[in-house]
Amino acid sequence: MIALASLTSAATGAAPTESSSPPTPKVVWTYDARPLRQLNLGDPANADKVWDTLHFVAALQGLVNRESPTLYLFYCEAFGVDTDQFWFDWARTEDGWLREAGVRALPSLNDLVRQFRGQFDGLVVYDPKVPATSNAASTAAGCDHLLPVRYDPAPDSIYRLLTEQLDLPVRLWLVNPDGSSRFTGAGNLPGLEIPSSGSPKVDVYRWALERYLKSGRCAPGVAAYYLDAYWLQRPRNAGSDMHTLSNHDFFIARRGFFFDLSSWADEPPVDDPRQPVGLDHQILLQILRALYDHAGGGMTQLGGFTPWPHKYTSHAGAGKHEPVPTEWEFSRIVSQFNAYVEADAAGLGAIANASFFQHYPLKPHYPQPNARPTAADWRARDYLTDAGKVAPRFYVGHYVGDYDAPSWLYKAVPPFFRDPKLGHVPLGWAFNPNLAERAPQALVYARRHATTNDFFIAGNSGAGYVNVRALTVRPDSGLPSGLDAWSRHCLPHYQRWDLTITGFVLDGSAGAATETEFALYRDFSPHGLGTHFERQPALRASIPTCPEVDLPDRVDAAVGAIADRARPRGDRPGFLWARSILKSPSWYAELSAKLREHHGELRIEVVDPYTFFGLIAEELKPQPGQ
């Protein structure tokens, strides 16, 4: 995921197994939060209502759905699709998972509380003046069976509704009962003999680190990097659901640790401008080290993404660093601690019901919907000559991205796999297999609706987004190599989803991958790698590789870019691994039609990813006597 490319644009690392979920639930309870999307966020009262409602509901959903699929939320939409409604209807009709379940709507927060009062212990109340306490409240929700609510004494607030009208007990105060701050940046941390750092924000995370992560109350290998209540100060900086509160349910269900800190050590963060420079960075490293230790050196699933529309970047008017370098710096750092990102990036960053769909019953194995092409197939298509040479054409393979985020997969699959032009062009759908943790039904739907021209590969950089060079070069962590942990994590995911190509080994700012890192992929991705900083197709550790090239968004511009690369090759075969982001099958069909219409003389062939990398291997294989 490169933050602006489309918007301008993990489980614990354990092997996936056959679902042990219970059978279809007898009753599914639903809550409709879609009216919140219609509120004008320019009105602070509306922003408060959106934030407070969804934080409470997402936490309740996480607790209620921890053991079985019970509570379903209607909220998300994209591409003109009512996304949550789509998946609910599909599970009740075509798929059949929920066909026999009764459906009961709960129209209000009062109804939700009354129905599920036995599944939580009380409230955790947090401080609107110290936004980081909202993330500490989400951590507490999962670990202490509490529901988070922002302190707000206004007569019509959700805080007053829960504490007075519904008489729910407050079990944990992250703000004093009179509304004054508990985290002040002075004295000792609340309840701990640990001196303050001088920053209320950083103190919140130091406190949560001691209480929940170092104590072992959080689950190993699960963490969440989501925007805190600072969103309330800038609710219109991105889409109406970019608070990403609906994403919290899964990580609360899994007892994950929540945080939101700047990765930059050379400037103070916009949400805490008076802290000493680099303090956010320091506590980030401490949290990542604790996550590494708690996971026993294995991989840690890290949901979320740099909140670049709101914090830490020049785009937000909140720093000197651009969004993409900020993404890369964060990824470089977390990779050094064996954490892989599930990049719920702005634009399509909100996902709902992951705690519900975590119980979707998966099979142990999902084969590719089409047989992998062989040399015999390539000869039949005249891609290989009788002498076994690659025919002198310009071969284009489409990397269909970016799907290293469950939220993007959840929202894009419904429109794209119902597109009337699906199947008109060979495509390599780059769906990271670890997304089966939070959006398994989307992976299954895509497989069932795939055509003979649809092939599945992994995206950035495998079973999760890491900088693979940062698995070996680790100046910030000082830890031993994480390559073995990464291999153990990726292999079972690739095997379940029958993947042998990784479409984009994303190096970012960690430095270019070397033979050491490429050799790792032989075990689970032997048929091809898309690379970041390579200059030309190559065999790296015996794996065929090709640098990815980003196509422009407009079809005509993309046609021109491909033609410009095809012309200079002369009478030799050429290769272009073309990366595009959130493009529909209709977009690819139009692109191919215009290439044929305007540039037929260039002999451009759009091929599937297995043919693409297979022909590179044929072209570069050592000849006898070499």
Image (cartoon, helix red, strand yellow):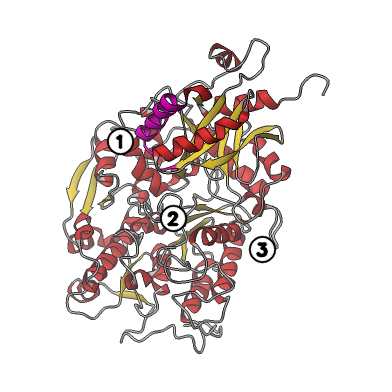
Extreme residue in the right direction: 625
Magenta stretch, main secondary structure class:
helix
Give the residue at mark 3: 477
Q: Is residue 209 left or right of residue 533?
A: left
Q: Is residue 535 magenta?
A: no
Q: Position of residue 56 (x, y in %)?
A: 29, 64
Of residues 374 and 284, the one drawn nearer to the viewer in this rendering: 374
Q: Position of residue 521 (x, y in %)?
A: 65, 38
Marks 2 and 3, the one that precedes in the sequence: 2
Of residues 261 and 237, the one drawn nearer to the viewer in this rendering: 237
Residue pictured at 45% horizontal, 35% vertical: 559
Of residues 586 and 117, the one drawn nearer to the viewer in this rendering: 586
Of residues 151 and 50, the one drawn nearer to the viewer in this rendering: 50
Q: Position of residue 301 (x, y in %)?
A: 51, 53
Given the image, on which type of amino acid does mark 2 rest? Arg
Q: Quadrant of residue 149?
A: bottom left
On the question of residue 457 being in view, the answer is no
Front: mark 2 or 3: 3
Give the residue at mark 2: 254
Q: Is residue 584 magenta?
A: yes
Give the residue at mark 1: 97
Marks 2 and 1, the one that precedes in the sequence: 1
Q: Is residue 592 left or right of residue 52?
A: right
Numbered disc 2: secondary structure: loop
Separation of disc 3 and disc 1 at Cα? Answer: 44 Å
Given the image, on which type of amino acid does mark 3 rest? Ser
